[in-house]
Image: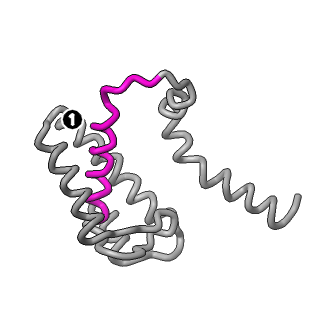
Amino acid sequence: MIASVLVLYVPIQKPNWIGYTATGMFFYVSGLIYRQFASNCTVTILSIVLVLSNYVLYPSFVHIRSSRLECGDPLLWLVSSVAACIFIYTLFKNKKFNIPILGWVGRHAMTILVTHWLVLNIIKRIVSDGL
């Protein structure tokens, strides 16, 4: 988790995968930790307050692919991003959607997350260089 903060404070330009791997691991570990508190109403309320105050008072944005801070504070961005995930999870955890594509995306989310940049880069290379 510390590596993701360090990568944002001391940006490493190349290779890009160091930054987004550290950030991805931060979010993965945060999700594992949150599972222990998923039913805690106080955590949910604090996450909502944190998300709203961050976006209103001190917005922070990071370009995920290059791990580049666009504006704001990297640590605040990480914390408010986890809070936003908690808020979205809480908002939809009791809703039952009968939309098959959402179920498919949910079951394959990690594969999509891991491979989408690879697929986009291959398509970009084909389009720009030709076959």
Position in image of residue 39 (x %, y %): 17, 32
Location of the C terminus by quadrant is bottom right
Most common SS among magenta residues: helix
Q: Amino acid at mark 1?
A: Ala
23, 42: nearer the viewer: 42
Position in image of residue 6 (x %, y %): 31, 71
Location of the N terminus by quadrant is bottom left
Name the side, left or right, on which 103 lies relative to 4.
right
Number of marks drawn: 1
Name the side, left or right, on which 16 lies relative to 128.
left
The residue range painted magenta reads 77-97
For residue 106, above or below residue 33: above
Q: Residue 76 colored magenta?
A: no
Task: Residue at 28% x, 40% y: name it.
Answer: 32
Name the side, left or right, on which 61 lies relative to 119.
left
- Residue that mark 1 sits on: 38
Query: Residue 22's quadrant in the figure?
Result: bottom left
